Amino acid sequence: MEIKAFQDYYPDHLSHCYGCGKLNEHGYQIKTIWDGDETLTTFTPKPYHKAIPGFVYGGLLASLIDCHGTGSAAAAMYKQENREMDTEPSFRFLTGSLFVKYLKPTPIDCTLQIRGKIREIKGKKVTVDVEVWAKGVVTVTGEVVTIQVPDKYIKEIIEGGIQ
Amino acid sequence: MEIKAFQDYYPDHLSHCYGCGKLNEHGYQIKTIWDGDETLTTFTPKPYHKAIPGFVYGGLLASLIDCHGTGSAAAAMYKQENREMDTEPSFRFLTGSLFVKYLKPTPIDCTLQIRGKIREIKGKKVTVDVEVWAKGVVTVTGEVVTIQVPDKYIKEIIEGGIQ
């Protein structure tokens, strides 16, 4: 049986994100799955995603952590309710805050593993701890605080703009 | 007289960054200048740099804050010593940590202003507070903790890899 990624369940109006939208042809199109109790994204940087020659640009690492976090938060809420990700009512999360700590340079000539642990689900807030692994070493850690928002609210933002 | 951006002073081996390297043809090539006591980057997102239709992807905002922060840190150190940015010894900064707080969705159909204030210079550590402005409103704030590293060390990383 083919494993569907969290992002494969996102509806079309939420699938345009540069980081994780399957409909954004220019973007990273990350895919996240469960790996035991952890969430896992694997990603191979392009040669031009560099900070200095040979090493990954920090903005990409922050981006991967961000989208990995919102996807993990949604998956965690469905899991807590013992529901499949394509059932209603839907869980949508936006990033409230993102903290990234760069421990050492991340080599670019490898496939990165981004691993998440659900630290806390508290009301509409889900906090995800993230590690970026490269060649068997954690090079970057992150904390993503995500906020659940009703799908109706997101549609209103898209359609009406904000004030 | 033409104003040179901080990034125009970066030597070639530090000009490959996807966020701020003038030699990275795929990247954002941000340019940062002094605006009074603040540092200023202006950036116009591409239509595909979106999170949801109409609004900027959070990873791009984190990336802009990151590179704006390291550039601002270097400029602040030169300014503190009352030196031009092309004088030796050079000041190079890497990001130690990055904190980004998303206050509201950032509209994509405008030119963003990224504004930095040097909060603290303490030894080799420079902390920069950053705001992202869109259509006259602050939509995102950031804190970038940067660490000064000798140019020799960066060249060693590039040439020899890390252990």
Image (spheres, coloured by chain):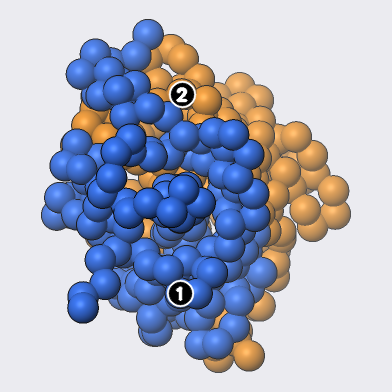
Chain colours: A orange, B blue
Residue A28 x %, y %: 33, 49
Residue drawn at (72%, 43%) of the image: A127
Residue drawn at (40%, 21%) of the image: A134
**Local SS, label 1:** strand
Residue A78 x %, y %: 69, 47
- Discs 2 and 1 lie in a common subunit: no
* The furthest residue to the front: B82
Q: In this image, B117 relative to B160: left or right?
A: right
Residue A83 in sight from this viewpoint: no
Viewer-nearest residue: A75 or B114: B114
Give the residue pinned by disc 2: A104
Give the residue pinned by disc 1: B35
**Local SS, label 2:** loop
Frontmost of labels 2 and 1 is 1
Residue drawn at (21%, 75%) of the image: B2
Amino acid carrying mark 1 in the image: Asp
Q: Is residue B66 above or below residue A103?
A: below
Residue A112: image quadrant is top left
